[in-house]
Image: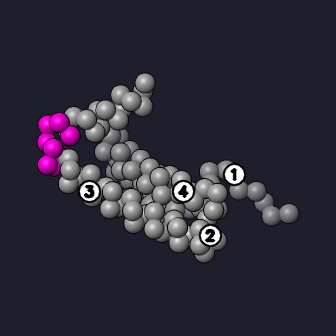
Amino acid sequence: KFVHVVLQREMGRYQQTFPLAWAKKHDTMREIYERIEDQMKRGVKERVLRPELGDLGATFFFGMMRALVIRELVFEKGGDMVADADRLIDTFFDGMGARRAAA
């Protein structure tokens, strides 16, 4: 129910109030997602990304980027988005787990 409420607030309100603006935003977001998806497919092809998760790669990466933007807007951290983007890419490829010392 929580996810439904969040998505309804984000998408439904603008779709009903400003249908043309919402359609443009929707098209732009779809285009960005498709570009990311193309890169994820390339990553699978080049064996940089795991093929069994290839279909989720664009969704995860897009969500991670979006979360950084929302964090900035909501919490007004005034952080360095470029540095955060670099950290995001490292996290995407290496995960959030603690790094283990080489044996």
Q: What residue is disc 1 on?
A: 98
* Mark pair 1, 4: CA separation: 26 Å
Find the magenta span and give its range.
15-21
Q: Which residue in the protein does label 4 denote?
A: 55
CB-based contact (under 8 Å), mark 2 and mark 4: no
Residue drawn where x is 53% and y is 72% of the image? 42
Looking at the picture, how far across and down is residue 79, in whole percent?
38, 53
Identity of the amino acid at label 4? Asp
Mark 2–mark 1 distance (CA, rounded to whole Å): 20 Å
Q: Please give the residue where the numbered disc 2 appears in the rendered image.
A: 48
Q: Residue at the top extreme?
A: 1
Image height of 72 relative to 2, above or below: below
Q: Nearer the viewer, mark 2 or mark 4?
A: 4
Which numbered tag is attached to residue 74?
none
The quarter of the picture where the C terminus appears is bottom right
Residue underneath mark 3: 27
Residue 2's spot in the image, x, y percent? 42, 26
Q: CA distance from mark 4 to mark 3?
A: 20 Å
Instruction: Please tell me whether mark 2 or mark 3 is closer to you in this view.
Output: 3
- Mark 2 or mark 3: name the one nearer the start of the chain: 3
Q: Amino acid at mark 1?
A: Ala
Instruction: Tell me if I can see residue 83 in this picture.
Output: no
